Image (cartoon, helix red, strand yellow):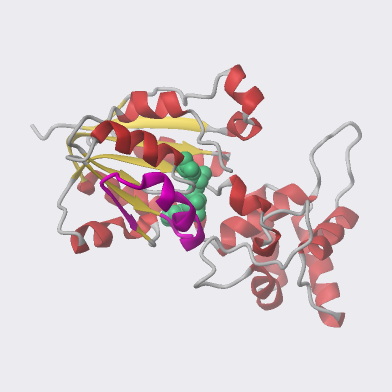
Amino acid sequence: MHIPVMPDEVLHYLDPQPRQLIVDATVGGGGHSRLIAEIIGEKGRLIGLDLDPEMLALARPRLVGMNATLVHRSFDELSEVLRSLRIEAVDGILADLGFCSDQLADPNRGLSFQQDGPLDMRLDQTRGEPASSLLRRLQERELADIFWRYGEERYSRRIAARIMDVRRKATLETTEQLATLVRTCVPRSRGHAIDPATRVFQALRIAVNDELGALERFLAVAPDLLTPGGRLVVISFQSLEDRLVKRALRNKEIWEELTRKPVTAQDEEIRNNPRARSAKLRAATKKEIP
Ligand SMILES: C[S@@+](CC[C@H](N)C(=O)[O-])C[C@H]1O[C@@H](n2cnc3c(N)ncnc32)[C@H](O)[C@@H]1O
């Protein structure tokens, strides 16, 4: 079961109050949502979004008896979601990016190379194009670009060329096939714990789910959806996302930054939840209109 990261820090920076209207843009297992819903109470309202209907199904029982509306949509469609609920603006928005432990542990999603499974990688399996299809369809150059841009993989060209070779004779359908292929292309540096397949898996996942595009669109509309004085809290798990968040919150015409440097998890939390190690939290208040 997914453990929510930096729960105290999230509540500190989001600062939800009784009766407020708060959006959890990435409900996941509902851990943060529940903490927020308990504070805003039944006179407040939590609007929760997730790309993955299975995560919403997991979260629902944790939010029983609370005033929570869960919606299966991407956070870059938040304007449309709020409009359909006849909500003009909210008091706070939380986005805890990436994926949940439950999704990673499910071999059928193909997010992890630790277990063999189909190369899918979609967080929303009801739409979009699975990774195996991208690997079949894209040109060598496009694949190399994905591995380089989203995975910062130095051997991106070599890996893309090997995929083209394999593609001529067979199809790449499973996580194990891809991980093995990558390992044959990338020399494993001695004493280095990270599996060479890590960066390629991250890159493909980002491409399959258009993660950076969705985040940019979300960050662009978030100010319009917050009341003046409303708060935005974003937790990211890799540098490409954190860079986008940092850049957006630096806009002083819109935001009053609450975190000049990203907030990271305490050692004790990291000991109990290793996933928290790479989490970076940034927060800002929407400026009052003069
Ligand atoms: C790190 S988990 C959130 C965990 C949650 N805060 C909790 O306490 O359980 C990230 C979640 O965001 C969802 N997600 C990823 N991209 C999304 C997007 N563009 N729109 C909505 N949800 C998204 C994933 O499906 C996943 O469930």
Residue 175, horizontal then vertical, whole percent: 76, 62
Does 155 sit above or below residue 142?
above
Give the residues drawn in magenta, as a range: 50-70
Farthest residue toward the top? 267
Does 114 sit above or below residue 238?
below
Q: Is residue 149 visible?
A: no
Give whichever of 133, 37 is nearer the camera: 37
Residue 210, horizontal then vertical, whole percent: 51, 60
Farthest residue toward the left? 290
Farthest residue toward the front? 65
For this view, does 237 lie left or right of residue 135? left
For this view, does 195 lie left or right of residue 264? right
Q: If the image is split into quadrants, where does the N terminus sit?
A: top right
For this view, does 232 lie left or right of residue 17? right
- Residue 74's quadrant in the figure? bottom left
Residue 52, horizontal then vertical, whole percent: 48, 60
Q: Is residue 16 visible?
A: yes
Does 70 sit above or below residue 229?
below
- Residue 147's quadrant in the figure? bottom right
For this view, does 202 lie left or right of residue 122? right
Residue 89, horizontal then vertical, whole percent: 17, 47
| Residue found 47% across the figure and 24% down from its top | 263
Is 240 in the magenta?
Answer: no
| Residue found 34% across the figure and 50% down from its top | 48
| Residue found 25% across the figure and 62% down from its top | 80
Is 66 in the magenta?
Answer: yes
| Residue found 83% across the figure and 65% down from its top | 177
Give whichever of 80, 23 is nearer the camera: 23
